[in-house]
Structure formats: structure tokens, C-alpha cells
Amino acid sequence: MSGHSKWSTIKRQKGAKDAARGAVFTKLGNTIAIAARAGADPDTNFTLRLAIDKAKAANMPSANIQRSIDRGSGKLGGEQIQEVMYEGYGPGGVAVLVECATDNINRTYPEVKLAFSKNGGNIAEKGAVAFQFDHKGMIRVKGGGDDLMLQALDAGAEDVVEEDDESVIYTEKADLAKVRDALKDQDIEILEAELTYVSNNTVEVTDADVARKIMKVMDALENLDDVSNTHVNFDIADGVQVD
């Protein structure tokens, strides 16, 4: 299964830096608000539980988390947060999905479009890119090896990809909660769990100049407050410098 990529590692490192300076709280709050639209109780709303877990891992204050839940469930009034997906292509023709959570599409769309066009990419029509991705559950855990693979597959996972001292476990979208809870019951350390979009085919980028241009697009998108997540079909080959 595609999806194991250098961009995933870079994005996680960037997320850690953003979390360290609190810059990530707006994005996390919007994600919580979106999830809370389906119910404010994390015990019965698994998507909300995942969003809260991610916020806590970034040390988001409990008061901020509760405010986001109240906002999404309508308790605070005002403009409702809505979820929207934009599709586009970066340099080299790589495919990009951009998940946004926004209270003003008239602000968000031009910002996303500019992030693409200003950095050598272009926004695409709805459906032009999304067909290249599958909506999956993703669980990142500590460790690897045959035992972990068997435990994950027995729990209902589809695939396991080892990354250094961690493993990424993919599930059907509907099986994410079941598999995550089964792994937790077996005392497997779970680093993160979320719904994601996994590309069907990976484009390997071997040219350093193209790689740097792609990273400029991705950085511009990730720096937008309304962008909650990005999903790509590229991988940067080992040895290609992007700094």
C-alpha cells in the first residue's frame, strides 16, 4: 500500500515544532469542532475522541478543547465550522488533497488557490485528484516485527508498514476504532490514530530542484490556519536534499 513517504516524516516533524510554539492549536480546535458536529460526547463519537487525543498529545489546554467542542456542537452560536476538500497538483504533476475546516469558504478557497499558484502548482476541479486516493484508517505505533504484524492483522488491519522503530497500520475506514482499541488492549503503544487518504500509486521524486519546489507548495498549504491536513501521492527518494 502506498502512503509511506518522506513527506509524512517531514510533516510530523513540522507538526511537532508548531505544537511546541502553540501554532497548531487553531488547526486542532477546528478539527475538534468539525468532529463535534456529529455529537459532543467522545465516548459515543469516535472521530471526536481521536481529535481530542491528538489535541492532548500536542498539550492543547483542556479549556481550549472544551471551547472547540462547544463551538462545533452549536453551544457558542456564531458561524459554524464546515469541512471542505480542495484538490490540486504540485510541481512535477504530483497530486495533493487539502482538507480544510473553515467558517468562511470565501476566505479559504482563495488562500488555498494562491498557495498552489504562487509556488508552481494549480488547484483542480472537484474529483480530478481524489480518485487517486482511498479513505483509510491509519494507526502509528511503536515497534515492529512479525509479532506486531500478526497482532494487527488479527485485530482486523489491512496492512502494516515498518518505518525505523515505528510501524504504520492501515485499516478500512470503518474498522479504525475496532483495531485501535484491540491494539491498546494488547498494551501496544499507539502514537497516533486518524482517518487519512492513502494514494493508490506513489510518484517518486528524484530531482532535488523539483523536490524543493514541491516542498514550497506543501509548506505554503500547511501554514494556512484553515488547512487541517494534506495528503499526497509523492515520495522523495532517499538522498535527495530538500533543505
Image: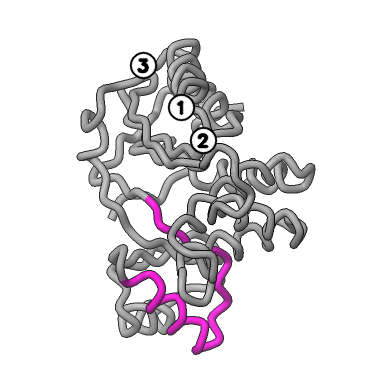
Q: Quadrant of residue 85?
A: top left
Amino acid on which the number 3 mark rests in the picture? Asn
N-terminal of the two: label 2 or label 3? 2
Region in magenta: 175-196
Coordinates of residue 138 in the picture (x, y in percent)? 41, 61
Residue at position x 40%, y 57% in the image:
195
Residue denoted by label 3: 122
Q: Is residue 120 visible?
A: yes
Compared with residue 1, is residue 193 higher up or lower down, i.e. above or below?
Answer: below
Residue 223, horizontal then vertical, whole percent: 61, 30
Q: Nearer the viewer, mark 2 or mark 3?
A: 2
Q: Residues within 10 Å of mark 2 (few under 14, many from 20)?
A: many
Label 1 SS: helix
Q: Is residue 33 magenta?
A: no
Tag 2–tag 1 contact (CB < 8 Å)? yes
Disc 1 vs disc 3: which is toward the camera? 1
Residue that extends furthest to the bottom in the rendered view of this protein: 186
Q: Quadrant of the N terminus?
A: bottom left
Q: Which residue is mark 1?
A: 105
Residue assigned mark 2: 102
Foreground residue among 58 and 208: 58
Mark 1 or mark 3, which has the lower sequence index? 1
Name the residue rendered at 32%, 31% in the picture: 95
- Give the alpha-carbon distance from disc 2 to disc 3, as whole Å: 21 Å
Query: Which image quadrant is residue 117 in?
Result: top left
Q: Residue at x 38, y 69 (%)?
A: 176
- Name the residue type under label 1: Ile
Q: Along the horizontal axis of the image, is 22 left or right of 24? A: right
Task: Answer above or below: position of 182 versus 44.
Answer: below
Answer left or right for 122 relative to 59.
Answer: left
